[in-house]
Image: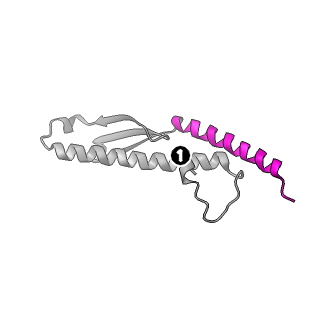
Amino acid sequence: MFDMMGMMGKMKEVQAKLKEAQDNLQYITVSAEAGAGLVKATVNGQRKLLKIEIDESLLNVNDREMVNDLVVAAVNNAMLTATERAQEEMKKHTSGLLPNIPGLDLGNFGL
């Protein structure tokens, strides 16, 4: 027999765990670099850019396009790494709460 009350309780537990995990994403910080470390970007698990560091040697360069490209590359690398770490964190917090259903995409929840 289908236990509707048990299912509702499980969903509330899943919601609480998801909220807790999402709230904790702000504490994950990752950095990535481009141009052999000339540009560094730091983002958090919520994919918010926290800091950009540009080596002084690039500030004297007349090739503005290269600096722009390095900043974009560093930020994109940091965002990718932050997304991967956030997904790992979400899975860790929700492990065992949801059944493994083929085709069920929980990507919008960070899973």
Report the front residue among 41 and 8. 8
Coordinates of residue 32 in the picture (x, y in percent): 38, 44
The quadrant holding residue 56 is top left
Coordinates of residue 60 in the picture (x, y in percent): 15, 36
Q: Would you say residue 40 sits in the magenta stretch?
A: no
Describe residue 80's horizontal placement relative to residue 74 as left or right: right
The quadrant holding residue 62 is top left
Q: Is residue 110 visible?
A: no
Q: Is residue 76 visible?
A: yes
What is the magenta segment's predominant secondary structure? helix
Tell me the crowding category of disc 1: few under 14, some 14 to 19, or many 20 or more residues within 10 angstroms, Cα based.
many
Q: Residue at x 42, y 46 (%)?
A: 79
Coordinates of residue 20 in the picture (x, y in percent): 63, 37
The quadrant holding residue 71 is top left
Q: Which residue is mark 1?
A: 86
Task: Give, as a single range, the part of the protein colored magenta.
Answer: 1-26
Report the front residue among 2 and 14. 2
Q: Say if 77 sits above or below 51 in the image.
A: below
Q: Residue at x 31, y 48 (%)?
A: 73
Describe residue 69's horizontal placement relative to residue 40 as left or right: left
Q: Would you say residue 16 sits in the magenta stretch?
A: yes
Mark 1 secondary-structure assignment: helix
Residue occupying the far bottom of the picture: 102
Describe residue 7's horizontal placement relative to residue 93 as left or right: right
Coordinates of residue 22 in the picture (x, y in percent): 58, 40
How was this image coloured?
A: one colour
Please state which amino acid type lies under the numbered disc 1.
Ala
Report the front residue among 62 and 101. 101
In the rendered view of the protein, which quadrant contains the N terminus? bottom right
Residue occupying the far right of the picture: 1
